[in-house]
Image (cartoon, rainbow, N blue to C red):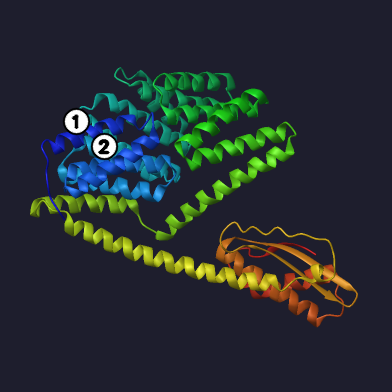
Amino acid sequence: MYIYYVKDFDKNIEKEIKICWEQRNKNLKASFNQGLQILLKSEQANYKKGIAGACKILGYCYWRFSDYTQALSYSLRSIQLYKFLEDKVGEADALNNLGAVYMFQKDHNNRLKCNLECLKIRQEIGQTEEIAGSFNNIGETYLEMGDIENAIIWLNKAIEYKDASPINYSWANFNLGKIYLLDKKTDKAIYSFKKALEISIIINYEVLIIESYLELAKVYTDSKRIENAKNYANKALNLAKKIGSKEYLSQAYYTLSKIYEIKKSFKEALNTFKKYHKIHALLFNEKKAEEIKDINYQYELNKLSEEAKNEREKSHDLKLAYDKIEAQNNLIEIKNKEFIDSVNYAKQIQKAFLAERQTLENKGFESFLIFKPKDIVSGDFYWSGQFAQYIYVVVGDCTGHGVPGGFLTMLGIAYLNEIVSLSTLPSPSEILTILREKIIKDISRNSTQRDGMDISI
């Protein structure tokens, strides 16, 4: 690695980081692009403080882009470096990023740990303006956990805190609006959301503007004020496209599909729902891929903290720590690929089973087929066959989805082939009776779960 310094390199990089971090709320994409440039320059110069700052920026941006794998990776790397550098301000910001990623993954316990640790650091170093932000984040976490009492306590702390910034004040009002919704106090909820929106527009805070649009669209949809709902939903959609957030795009399309359905504009409702489903499925699969890795990130965070401390005592070089993490990540990627490859192979086997059944097409019946698995392998199946003068058509929905559901679909097809081959023109009720007996005998009897399928013949 080449190590070089130009005059005032570190001061210039730190100035760039400060500007880039501050503009993330107003122009997310510009902040992301500048963060990439800062990371490149800092890595070329082996300037660890610059690398830490760039990783913090990129961790935040990837979180807002709904790319949670990258957000976790960059946030953990920035925390490790800040711990090594003993930079408490940077560590608190990076912990805040990490907690936000846990929020979207619905991992409330780990998010609360990050929130509380972040608050502790900010109180220790006297970071007064950001303390209100931690109050709000803790309140929001309790809200997501269903602990409304604690949520109200912490959100009021944020609102009443004398040094609260406009951003933190508006977030606290926004989250109180959610609580009013739970209490079915619609007018108070709208007031709180509009208050958060008003402040966000003044300071040009894109993320909270779009969150407020979405919540107002949902409230107006539920109260059948459709034109207001459509107006806010479209504003949310346009801003989501601008900042490139899959999560917000998904929410905006879903809300619009409900609005069109209420208006009885069924074609528009179907088109927007398809767009929602496509993005939602993408987010779901990304989340599943992350779960497959089976990493306890809180454990990794604690381990990185200890490693940074030990490395600081031995030397000021993180190369060994990086190599260990890289080796672990490579192993995880290999295991993940092996798993995905095996599931894709199972998909091909299932596809072969389903593709054999083309009786309706061969007999000239006008028909169509929609088969869209939720995961790579489906828990649904179809089957048809001709025996004497009769054609049997079957649609089945097995318990579970993915690989477990896929196994049951192939068993269902195999059982149907066996039943009709051994019987003389069985009726649909006879097929179902025999099928039920076979599933109870071969599967459910040896399982603690209620395995089976919903089926129509």
Label 2: element kind: helix
Residue type indicated by callout 1: Ile
Whether residue 113 can be seen here = no
Q: Position of residue 444 (x, y in %)?
A: 64, 69
Q: Earlier in the sequence, mark 2 or mark 1?
A: 2
349 is higher (above) or lower (below) than 137: below
Q: Position of residue 456 (x, y in %)?
A: 78, 62
Q: Residues within 10 Å of mark 1 (few under 14, many from 20)?
A: few
- Disc 2 to disc 1, C-alpha distance: 10 Å
Q: Is residue 25 left or right of residue 176?
A: left
Quarter of the image with the N terminus is: bottom left
Q: Residue furthest bottom?
A: 422
Q: Residue furthest front?
A: 6
Identify residue for label 1.
125
Label 1: element kind: helix
Q: Residues within 10 Å of mark 2 (few under 14, many from 20)?
A: many
Q: Is residue 430 left or right of residue 310?
A: right
* Residue at x-position 29% and y-position 27%: 131
- Marks 2 & 1, CB-CB < 8 Å contact: yes
User: Would you identify the image quadrant in which residue 53 lies?
Assistant: top left
312 is higher (above) or lower (below) than 357: above
Q: Position of residue 311 (x, y in %)?
A: 13, 53
411 is higher (above) or lower (below) than 180: below
Q: Residue furthest left?
A: 314
* Residue at x-position 23% and y-position 30%: 123
Q: Is residue 373 left or right of residue 208?
A: right
User: Would you identify the image quadrant in which residue 405 lies?
Assistant: bottom right
* Residue at x-position 74% and y-position 79%: 418
Q: Is residue 8 left or right of residue 76?
A: left
Residue type indicated by callout 2: Ala
Identify residue for label 2.
92
User: As rendered, which of 33 and 295 lies closer to the eye?
Assistant: 33
